[in-house]
Image (spheres, helix red, strand yellow):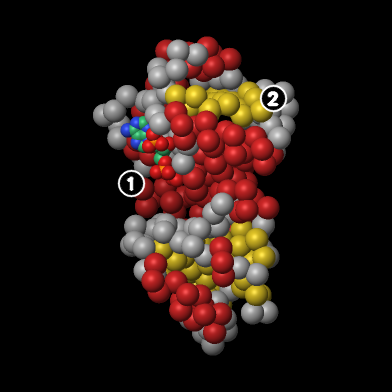
Amino acid sequence: MQITGKTKIVGVIGDPIEHSRSPQMHNAAFAELGLNYVYVPFHISPGALPAAIEGFKAINVVGLNVTIPHKQAVIPFLDEISRDAELFGAVNTLTFQNGQIKGDNTDGLGFLEGMRETGFELTRGESALVIGAGGSARAVIVALTSIGLETIFVANRTTSKAIKLAEDLSDAIGTSIHGIGLDDPQLADIVDSVALVVNTASVGMDISRPPLIHTEWLRPQTAVYDIVYTPPETRLLLEAAERGCHTIQGLGMLVHQGAIAFEKWTKTAPPVKTMKQVLQQSLH
Ligand code: ATR
């Protein structure tokens, strides 16, 4: 990569930021397309956020990804917010233009694209089960409602959080969403009835721990998506594959949420294949 007087700056803000794989993914994409951009990780502590935003405006940064702990904290600095970001209550992408900042959230579309690229399509009237009730579950549920599903179930260790999330989103969107506990006796029947099961709980990272649902409940016709991508093949996915289920790794969502941001900033179609290869290499 050659930095010149015309190089445009994009990047990611977070605290910590050292673990981020986005710089490798985006810089490889710029190199492949010969775009004169550089993607830089910025370690911004919570107290430094207001000054950092002013600074980014002053130096004409083109766009930023936003990660923990700033996904909600950046909202007051925006001039415009997308509907997805508003519904998720979190922003992961900023675009700077003419001194104005637009906030977006590409996780939902990234989730759907990650699913479609494996050849799996959900159709209107089907149902899905989402495990976990944190910020990622919220984004996944909002994305799923855009397909026109009949019912979405949210199952969580802390039942009250599942019920609250389901109520919040049912009110905002109008789809039928039900929150239950992971220990609810109905869970076996729900797993048996849905077309898709999605895990959003970070506990999937630990391969020595059993998945949060009993995988014997899965039918081979059910697709299983784990948005956890370290390891790429989680224990839930391994067990689901053994039962003959179509499985979807979280890596696709990670690539696509980045690719959608890339396109917003550069107005150029992203080289998704290269971006995925770079991420795969960085995870091994
Ligand atoms: P994010 O915003 O990335 O989704 P989060 O808000 O920390 O992350 O949510 C993590 C989810 O994983 C929660 O639904 C959490 O369940 P609780 O609400 O009961 O805490 C779930 N989770 C984390 N560790 C878990 C565990 N050991 N067993 C079951 N669920 C777990």
Q: Quadrant of residue 196?
A: top right
Residue reaching furthest to the bottom: 5
Q: Are marks 2 and 1 in contact (CB under 8 Å)?
A: no
Where does residue 152 sit, x and y in percent of width and height?
61, 28
Query: Is residue 109 visible to the viewer in this orientation of the structure?
Result: yes
Look at mark 1 in the image and give the residue it sits on: 284
| 63 to 120, vertically: above or below | below
Circle 2 — which element? loop
Q: Nearer the viewer, residue 2 or 181?
A: 181
Q: Earlier in the sequence, mark 2 or mark 1?
A: 2
| 39 to 196, vertically: above or below | below
What numbered label is drawn on residue 117?
none
Q: Quadrant of ligand 1?
A: top left
* 205 relative to 244 in the view: left or right: left
Image point (39%, 25%), residue name: 212
Look at mark 2 in the image and give the residue it sits on: 150
Circle 2 crowding by C-alpha within 10 Å: few under 14, some 14–19, many from 20: some
Q: Nearer the viewer, residue 122 or 36?
A: 122
Circle 1 — which element? loop
* 43 relative to 81 in the view: left or right: left
| 233 to 2, vertically: above or below | above
Task: Give amino acid for label 1.
Answer: His
Q: Nearer the viewer, residue 228 or 105?
A: 105
* 257 relative to 278 in the view: left or right: right
Image point (34%, 61%), residue name: 16
Closer to viewer: mark 2 or mark 1: 2
Image point (52%, 12%), residue name: 189
Image point (58%, 48%), residue name: 88
